[in-house]
Image (tube, rainbow, N blue to C red):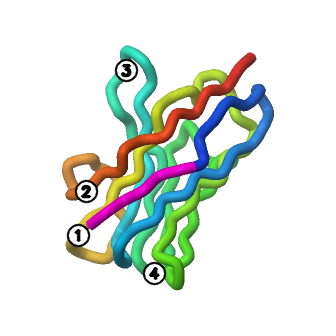
Amino acid sequence: VQLQASGGGLVQAGGSLRLSCAASGRYVMGWFRQAPGKEREFVATISRSGTTYHSDSVKGRFTISRDNAKNTMYLQMNSLKPEDTAVYYCAAKSTGSLIARVQHEYDYWGQGTQVTVSS
């Protein structure tokens, strides 16, 4: 499974970014992030059929989605805050079809894309 994340960048607080993650197949997928000096944390997940779950810290601001025809997952990030600054990773789970919120459930990881939100 190959994952290619893109779309990160520098944005001012209150702005928006959309991350993309192209996969080589159709899997349960998720976004995680790691801020400097902190552990990697769960952001959002989407099942193969499109069921979604978002962490409380991003609920109402971020939206995970997927285009199965393109084998691509997205993370639309609105109302960005400086505390959203992190490297964002996409991940894929090779078995099952339900959402997954725990890192060790994922088998494959993308290379990460930097999101920086300035105040």
Dot 2 or dot 3: first in sequence order is: 3
Give the labeled residue for mark 1: 94
Secondary structure beneath label 4:
loop
Q: Is residue 91 above or below residue 48?
A: above
Residue at image point 37% right, 77% down: 26
Q: CA distance from mark 3 to mark 1?
A: 27 Å
Query: Nearer the N terminus, badge 2 or badge 4?
Result: 4
Q: Is residue 48 left or right of residue 11?
A: left
Whether 8 is among the magenta residues is no
- Sequence order check: which comes first, mark 1 or mark 2? 1
Residue at point 50% right, 29% down?
A: 86
- Residue identifier under label 4: 49
Q: Amino acid at mark 2?
A: Tyr
Q: Secondary structure at mark 3?
A: loop
Q: Nearer the viewer, mark 4 or mark 1?
A: 1
Question: Quick one: which residue is furthest to the bottom in this view?
Answer: 69
Could you tell me the amino acid type at mark 3?
Lys
The mark nearer the N terminus, 3 or 4, is 3
Of marks 2 and 3, the one in the foreground? 2
Q: Nearer the viewer, residue 111 or 108?
A: 111
Residue 3 lies in the magenta-colored region: yes
> Label 3: which residue?
38
Q: Using the numbered discs, state the Cα–Cα distance from disc 3 to disc 4 in whole angstroms.
A: 32 Å
